[in-house]
Amino acid sequence: MKAQIALAATVLSFAVCTSAYADRLADIKARGTLICATLTSSEPLGFQDPETRQVVGFDVDMCGAVAKQLGVKLEHKGVSVEARVPELALGRVDLVSAALGYTKERAEQIDFTSSHYQTPIKLIAHSNGGFNKVEDLAEKRISANKGSTPELFARRALPKATILTFQDTPAAFLALAQNKVQGLALSQPSGVRFVNESNGQYKFLDGSLAWEPTALGVKKNEPALLKAVNEALDKMEKSGEIDALWTKWFGPKTKFNIVREKKLTPISTFQS
């Protein structure tokens, strides 16, 4: 009798878990919307348009494109850098498209789609500060977004440096502008505008802290949703839609002028 009860409990548990795994995608389809989170102060990924006051950008368009592929409408949600993983883990959003770099530590908490682009993590410094390469800041003060991969990679690459963290990129940049730090760690796309718009006041240091694969985030144990989003990304890559969105926000007609060198890559490539 005890064995039968134990077996029944095991079967029930398996059934509940299996059902739960499929629920997220089913919920999205049922409600007709995809709740997708992006940053709101990181141009050109997710930032407020000064004219419309709406949050726009590459990540926002990626959210909309994936929602369209899933046959639902987009429900946009703003999120801070440090809240990206918790929002997913707590189930408050379905998908995160917010400069979400893959790391093994994060992969223990959330699942990652294929990487849709890869960029170097750079350091920005004052052009007249006497620093020329990443190693020159090995024992200096460096600012970064709290909970970001630039913070993580700065700590790894320059263990003797003092890393000061801030709630968003503008605040981290202000620390550099006010000489509270000697360098600012951030991804190349996020840093280009600070360099290009500074009239030569700031520059990228030679070298990089790391080369970061960026992907979309999905809550753990949602294989149906993860598969659906990966299939959507694959269709978007093959049709040229991801390239088109990249050109819109990062291409030669923008102030960023960054080439999307690396295309859609399975996340398993970075897990070894």
Image: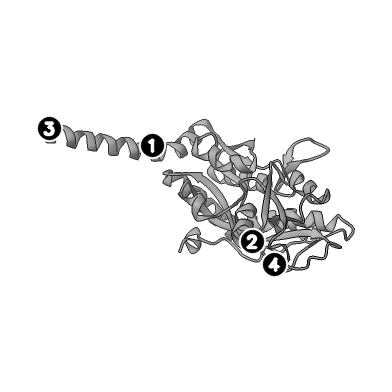
Is 194 located above or below residue 9 in the figure? below
Q: Earlier in the sequence, mark 2 or mark 3?
A: 3
- Distance (Cα) linking label 2 and label 4: 8 Å
For residue 20, which numbered disc appears in the image?
1
35 sits left or right of 13 in the view: right
Q: Secondary structure at mark 1?
A: helix
N-terminal-most mark, 2 or 4: 4
Pointer 3 residue: 2
Q: CA distance from mark 4 to mark 1?
A: 48 Å
Is any part of residue 17 visible from this angle? yes
Tell me the tag on residue 171: none
Q: Nearer the viewer, mark 1 or mark 3?
A: 3
What secondary structure is marked by label 3?
helix
In the image, 31 versus 13, the foreground residue is 13
Identified by mark 1, the residue type is: Ala
Residue with the mark numbered 2: 158
Q: Residue 118, relative to residue 107: is it above or below? A: below
Mark 3 / mark 4, whichever is N-terminal: 3
Which marked residue is nearer to the observer: mark 1 or mark 2? Answer: 2
Q: Earlier in the sequence, mark 1 or mark 2?
A: 1
Q: CA distance from mark 3 to mark 4?
A: 65 Å
State the separation of the CA atoms marked 2 and 3.
58 Å
Query: Crowding at label 3, few (<14), some or many (≥20) Cα neighbours within 10 Å?
Result: few
Q: Quadrant of the C terminus?
A: bottom left
**Mark 1 or 3 closer to N-term?**
3
* Residue farthest right in this picture: 199
Q: Is residue 17 above or below residue 238?
A: above
Instruction: Please tell me in which quadrant of the rendered image residue 205 appears.
Output: bottom right
Write down the residue under mark 4: 135
The three-letter code of the residue at mark 4 reads Glu
Q: Position of residue 84 (x, y in %)?
A: 58, 42
